[in-house]
Amino acid sequence: MATTDIEELGRLIAALPPTPEGWVRAAQELPQVRRGLDDLLARAEADSALRERLLADLESTLADAGIEPTRHVLSDVRERLRSP
Amino acid sequence: MEPEPTDAALVARCRSGDDSAWTLLVERFSRYVYAICSQGFRLGRHDTEDVFQDVFTRAYENLPKLRNDDAIRPWLAQLTRRLCIDHLRDATREVPVEELEPDGMDELIETLDDALTVREAMARIGEPCGDMLDRFFARDQSYRTIGEELDLPAGTIASRISRCLEKLKAAMEDSEALVSPEVG
């Protein structure tokens, strides 16, 4: 990078404004959420009552398992439940 | 102060299952991905959030397949561009794909790459300078707000920012010298 001009430095700092905190946190929590979901879905495969609960009331079942049912988590789980 | 890990070191740690490295990787590149979606493609807030989460989800899933750990930055840029285009294509099926990417995207990415390099230098100069420069330039906070939040007299903020910029400039010059040492 060529510039060490003070004004240009200010402009470049401004070029990367902060991302909404909640978005960053959700992305950072991805590994833990993934592990929680993998565990829950593995249990649901062996436990038909749990699978039925997931299908009937996904949000509450996820929340009960300690997984925050965000829009992206819900969409991910729905997709995984649909796949054979 | 412990030096920030390189991109390659961070990727290697993520691949070995180190959650704290993933946290740092998201922190390092979140503004970059956000800027490509919001400034480059001018997506609305809702669409930007969708693409943002999708980028990091796919990055997490595909990190083990990354051939060159040093290439995480261009890889993320490319992934973000592709997902923005996919998102726009879903919304506007009648528009040809090649028209979905706004003009000047390569130049914007180049600017954002430079901005990330400046961020690396900000991390090296440490606090409170990094925080103060971020508040003033990126968060657009007034001298008064910065003074209140950092518990400093508002009248001293302008001169502190000026000194921090000089410090940043020196850090940038140092890194330039490391990248291209003078011969002779």
Image (cartoon, rainbow, N blue to C red):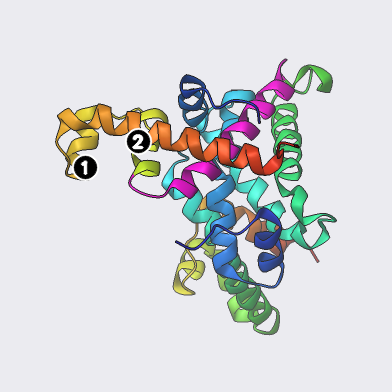
Per the model, the C-alpha gap separating discs 1 and 2 is 10 Å
For the image, the number of numbered tags is 2
Q: In this view, does A59 lie to the left or right of A84?
A: left
Toward which corner of the image does residue B106 lie, by quadrant? top right
Q: Can residue B142 be seen in this view?
A: no
* Chain name for mark 2: B
Task: Report which residue position mark 1 lands on.
Answer: B149
For badge 1, the amino acid type reads Glu
Task: Report which residue position mark 2 lands on.
Answer: B135
Coordinates of residue B83 in the picture (x, y in percent): 72, 37
| In the rendered image, the vertical position of residue A23 relative to residue A33, given as above or below | above
Q: Give the range drawn in magenta.
A: B102-128
Mark 2: few, some, or many residues within 10 Å (few <14, many ≥20)?
Answer: many
Q: Residue at x 26, y 27 (%)?
A: B158
| In the rendered image, the vertical position of residue A28 relative to residue B54, given as above or below | below
Magenta stretch: dominant SS? helix
Mark 1: few, some, or many residues within 10 Å (few <14, many ≥20)?
Answer: few
Q: Is residue B114 magenta?
A: yes
Q: Residue at x 69, y 33 (%)?
A: B84
Q: Is residue B113 magenta?
A: yes
Tell me the SS state at disc 1: helix
Circle 1/circle 2 CB separation < 8 Å? yes
Coordinates of residue A32 in the picture (x, y in percent): 56, 69
Q: Which of B7 and A27 is in front in this view?
A: B7
- Circle on res. B55: none
